[in-house]
Structure formats: C-alpha cells, structure tokens
Image: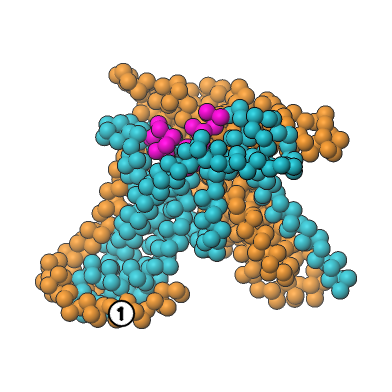
Amino acid sequence: MLDRLRDTAPKTILLTAAALFSVFPLLSMFSAALQPQGTAPAGITFPTSPHWHNFVDAWNVANITTLVKSSAILVIGVVPIAMLISSMAAYAIAQLRIPLGNVFFLLLLLGLTLPYEIVVVPLYYQMQQLGLLNTQLGLILPLIGLNMPFAVFWMRTHFQSVPLEISESSSIDGAGPWKAFQHIQLPLAVPALASLGVLMFLSTWNQFLLAIVLIDDPNKRTMAGALQGFVGAHSTDVVLLNAGALLIMAPTILVFLIFQKYFIQAMLAGAVKG
Amino acid sequence: MSAVDGLTTPVDVADTVSATAPRRGSRRGAGLGDRFRGTALPSRARWAGWLFALPALVMYAVFELYPIITAVQYSFFDWDGISVATPVGVENYVRVFTEPQLVASIVHAFILIIFFTFLPVLLALVVASIVREIRSKVAGAVARTLMFLPQIIPGAASAIAWTWMYSPDGAVNQMLRALGLGSLARPWLGDFTWALPAVGVIGTWLATGLCTLLLMAGIGKIDGSLYEAASLDGAGRIQQFRAITLPGLRQEIGVCITITIIAALASFDVVFMSTQGGPGYATQVPGVQVYQLAFTENRIGQSSALAVVLSLIVLAVILPIQRFFKEK
C-alpha cells in the first residue's frame, strides 16, 4: 500500500502540476474579474466579496449578445458549405478517380502548410474590389476557400477507406454518382464529417487575423476578433477587461465541456492526419 | 471502422433509391450505370466527376491560390495601396534581409521555436512517459480536460490572460515576491530583454497540453509487454525511455514538431494582442510585421515580400521534417 503510494504520488503530483499550469492563467483572470470595478487588483487574490455583477456589466459593455449572434452567422455560413463541397471533392478524388485528381490534391496540400499571412493582404484588396469589405459574406467566402485544403484532405482519408465496391454495386443498380453520393456515401461519412465540423467550428469561431483585417466593425467579427476592439476600448480597466475576455471565451469552453470527448478525439486525429 | 457500422441502413436506402435513379443517371451519358466500374470507367464519365470537385476547386482557387499569386506579384512593386504601383524588382526582398526591423522579426520567429516547439515537446515527453503508469482513470480524464483548455480558447484571449499575469501587479510578480525574489519582479512584457521569452512562454503554455495529450495517446499504443520485457532484462527508466518510448512515439513527435513550428514561425494572435511587437521591436515577428507594414505603414509591396519569404521559410523547414519523421 505504502509502496504503491510512494510510486504513484510523484506521478500524480506531476500530472496535477501540468494540469494546474494549464488553468492557472485562467484562474488569475477569474480572480481579477471578481474584484470591485475601478480598483487595481493585485495578482491572484481570493475575492472576499466577489463582484459577480462585473460579468453582467461586461456582458453589456462588450455586446456579448451581438457577438454571439455574429459569430454564429459566420459559423453557419462557413461550416456546412465547407463540409459539403469538401466531401464532394474528396469523393471525386478518392472514389470517382477523376482525371488529374491527384494534381488537384497536391495543389491543396500546398495550402495546408502555407500561413494565412500570405493571403491576408491580397484578400483585403480583393474584397474591396468585390465590395465585400466589412461584410460578413466577405469573411465567410475566404474562410470556406481557406478551409478546403484541410477539409478535402480529411474527407479524402475517409473516402479512401470506403471500398470501391459500394460505389460499383450502387451504379449497377442504376444510381448515378450524385445519388450514390447523397444516399450512400454521405451517410457513411457521418463520423468523419462530425469531427470535421467540430474542427472547423473551432477554427472559424477562433479566427482572428482574417476577422480583424476584413471586418472593421468589431460587432460583425468573430468572438476572437472582437476581443481586439474590446481591449482597445478598455485596456485600463483590468477588472472589466478580464471579465469581458472570460465571457468571450466562455462559449467555446462551454461547447468544449459538453462535447469534450468528441473535441479531443477530433483534435488528436486532426493533428495526426494534418 | 465506423463506416462499417453504418453499412446496413444506407444500402437499404440505396435499394429504394435505385427505382427512380436511372432517369437521372442517363443525363451523364447512356448506360453509365452498367459500365461504372472503377478504372474501367469511360473517360467522359470520369471527367464528369469533376462536377463534384468543381465547387471546392473554385473556392480554393479564388480565395487561396489567386491571393497567393497576387501576393507574389505585389512583392515586386512599391505600392501604398492607393496610388499607382511602381515596379522595383527584388528591392523589397533585399530589404527583408537588410532592414534591421525585418531581419529581427525573422530571427525572433526562429527563437520562438525554442518556446513553441522544443520546450513543449520536452515537457510532454516527460509528463507522458511518467504518467504512462498511472492507473487512475478519473485523474487522467480531469487532467486531459484541463490540459486541453488552452487549445480551445482563442489565442487572442490567451494573450489577454497572460498580459494580466505579466503585468506589474500580476500573478507572476506576485509569486516572485512571495518567494522572496521581489528584486526579479518587473513588467515582463515591457522589458526589452525579457519580453520575447515572456511571449514565448505563452506559446509553451498553448502547445504543452496538446503535445502531452498527443504523446499520451501515442504511448498508450505502445505494446506494454515491451516495457515488461525490458525491465526483466534490467533496463532502467532512462534506457526504457530511449529504447522503447522514443522510437514508439516517432510519428506523434513528428506531428507535435510540425504543428508547433508552423505556429511559432507564423505566430500572430498572441504577439499582436500581448505586445504588438514591442517594446521597440523586441518581440516583432513576421506575422505582426506583415500586418503592420500593410495596414499601418501602407507598404503593401514590402509586406507581401515578407509574407512570401515567411511562407518559403515555413515550407523549407516543414518539408524536411515531414520527410524525416515519415520514414521508418
């Protein structure tokens, strides 16, 4: 018994330390957010009389209701369409074996490693020409395009695992490629699509660079992009700033805690495949 | 594997569908269904498959390939975004490697690799290999959840959390004072020497959880009997680590390194929100520099040249790493 304890105690302590390191900055934010407004809080202090009302104030000041709505619009604009057209393309490459499909795929792989920094400035002028600057559509369209490399890559891995016989037997039954895709391939792809959806939700919701460049009005941006406007306006009020930032993080944390298992699986698998 | 579970229902659906399908299918060329057999497919039908790939290709071409080409084009011009652009040859590229501020940003990107990649992988290896033997499922699950949090919240928000930690009254200085090291306390992000490492630690924080989880998952796949055999042969912890754990984790380590190096070289959110590249340009990185050159200094050509160089650096670093970790 003692031996086992001696053996596991250091490991448990190490694991605890690693876990604490991960949440410590968030706890420090939380402690600051509960101090009286207008004061200068010092480090981590246990608030004797926590000012929960700060969160209500920050909610109103940071326009959280508007932000959640605009982020949701962006996610709804990007994720379903990106899921659909990427799986169609992956199906064409892996199952229909379209000519030059591999060339297309190699072209996509190029986009998988290139940083967003190279497209952001040209996209700004492109959107200006299209008259889409400062509109949500002007952010949705590029995000769909920029999601293609990973999304097609991800779905292609799935479609490669589906035996070709399934397509063949359905075509013998007379189903065209579209029917086969819609009624056979898509239902089979649900698990892969679900993980892809989780990953794209997260990357859209947290998108920062493109959001601050392509949309001027913080209220039309992603939650992450809105932080920049919020910090600019309230950088001196430590209490309100921390409360607001926590609120802005809260939706992703909530979604994560609810769909945790899914997130971890998707992100680990996504990392390994990417 | 999960595809197999779903097999029964969709096929049933397909049966009912096939009754109405032929009329539709005939649009793509008569009798397509009979000849639709993998490689034996007539070329006309195989080209028709491009209709499926077209939307993705169009979106990718218009919003990624075209901007990339445009960036390369911009990089050979002197352009303020409004007036007429003048061609300047490779001058913008020469400046990337001669203008001190731009050179510094690239150097910083490489220094950040120590914090974004090297430290997290090292820490993750230690934690993962020690935790391998812990049996408690609850502790593991709680730790997993907590360690994953930094991955979930936006990088910009992490920057705010850490800016507060590093501030004169923040938790870092508070702890130093509590340990009697008050003389070391300073406004970390405003300090010319310490700002860059301080920003780097934010990256360590972001990456360590993900790497630990990846490596823990990887270690779980290593055959446990290897360790038993090794310890029967009298191999110590360190030897086991070198002979079993490290080679067994080759792929996962490769993944960690790839992801985190890209994050270090192309960092933007964290630096932009914590220091904006300051003080002076002590924490300037290519990502923030690209943004500032284009949108505050109106030097579009210069910004694009830096972006192109950054992309080439990423490719030049990542491709060999990919190759190294792929071969077994």
Mark 1 falls on what kind of element?
Answer: helix
Residue A217 quadrant: top left
* B293 vs A79, nearest the viewer: A79
Q: Chain B appears in which tint? A: orange
Q: Looking at the picture, does residue B82 appear above or below residue B159?
A: above
Left/right placement of residue B213 relative to residue A186 reads right
Residue at the spot 42% in from the left edge and 26% down from the top edge: B294
Question: Which residue does the numbered mark 1 point to in the structure image?
Answer: B11
Q: Position of residue A252 (x, y in %)?
A: 52, 51
Residue at the spot 80% in from the left edge and 66% down from the top edge: A8
Q: Chain A appears in which tint? A: cyan
Instruction: Say whether residue A246 is visible.
Output: yes
Furthest residue in direction right, as rendered: A2
Amino acid type of the residue tagged 1 in the rendering: Val
Residue segment shown in magenta: A214-234
A158 falls in the magenta region: no
Q: Position of residue A170 (x, y in %)?
A: 25, 77
Residue at the spot 52% in from the left edge and 40% down from the top edge: A59
